[in-house]
Image (cartoon, rainbow, N blue to C red):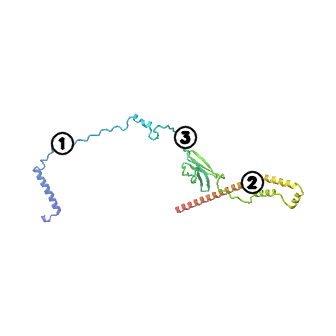
Amino acid sequence: MRAEDAGARTWLYAAVAGWALCAWVLAMFGMGGSIDRLDEDPSLQQPLPTPASAAPERLGPLAQYGDIAGRPLFTDTRRPQPFVIDPMAEAGETGSGFDYVLTSVVRTPTLQLVILQPTEGGDPVRVRQGSAPDGAPGWVLQSVEARRAVFAGPEGEQALELRVFDGVGGQAPTPTAGSPADMAVGDADASAVPDDTPGQRQRGTGGGQAPRQQATAQEGAADAAAPEADAAVDSAAQQQAAQDQVEMIRRRIEERRARLRQEDATRSNQRANQTQ
């Protein structure tokens, strides 16, 4: 093969072979034989790091901390204060955590619901059967009756009776005219006035004492009947006021029940739309 026909690979192999031959010839003439290790120089040696000394104990003897008990840090006077831990007192102060008044009861074939009012005031709370109010999560509504609700909690069962309006407060009823008591008072006043007819005036002028005695007796009877008539008027007014208050409460309950039924119907429609 001629040198002109040699490829790049052939030239690479030839160069590697020539380099190896040169290294072998140089090794034969002692290349690398004069290389030796240097003598040890103590000045070049670096000293080893010395270990750090052990830190002293952070906690001292117990007698060193006597001031902590003799001068408490979290008291104003820096003097010890006596205290007693009474589990019964803590339980009494904490209470049951269930302080509500039953104001409304809703009972339907598909819904059992009560409305509670906090005793200390606040917004009413609606509770379904099987759930608990937000303010007392440990008390679950077990059963709902017509005028009673039973809750079960950590301390057992607690029954709430439906609050009944006692007639205190509210708007005063409008006074009505022409009541039977007013008519009775009018009749008594009319009977107390003597009939001053011409015949009676003639009989009176004739010197008779009977008409004067009769008029005096009628006036005494009217005075005696006046307190009874006033008492009858007051009793009738009180009865009318009580009836008006009962009617107002009944009307409010009906409006609240209608509102709750409407809200339940709206929720049912929303659930149906979501499922579809």
Residue at 63 percent of width and 58 percent of height: 252
Crowd band around label 3 with a 10 angstrom C-alpha radius: few (<14), some (14–19), many (20+): few
Provide residue 154's location: percent of width, then percent of height.
55, 45
Q: Which residue sits furthest left?
A: 29
CB of mark 3 within 8 Å of CB of mark 1? Answer: no
Is tag 2's residue or tag 1's residue first in the polypeptide sequence? 1
Residue at 16 percent of width and 59 percent of height: 13
Q: Which residue sits furthest right?
A: 206
93 or 44, nearer to the observer: 93
Q: Which residue sits furthest top?
A: 63
Residue at 54 percent of width and 40 percent of height: 89
Q: On the image, numbered disc 1 is attached to which residue?
A: 43
Between the residue at mark 3 and the residue at mark 1, the CA separation in whole angstroms equals 81 Å
Q: Amino acid at mark 3?
A: Ala
Crowd band around label 1 with a 10 angstrom C-alpha radius: few (<14), some (14–19), many (20+): few
Between the residue at mark 2 and the residue at mark 1, the CA separation in whole angstroms equals 130 Å
Is tag 3's residue or tag 1's residue first in the polypeptide sequence? 1
Q: Amino acid at mark 2?
A: Asp
- Element assignment for label 2: helix
Q: On the image, numbered disc 3 is attached to which residue?
A: 89
Q: On the image, numbered disc 2 is attached to which residue?
A: 230
- Element assignment for label 3: helix
Provide residue 59's location: percent of width, then percent of height.
37, 37
**Mark 2 or 3, which is nearer the eye?**
2
Q: Amino acid at mark 1?
A: Ser
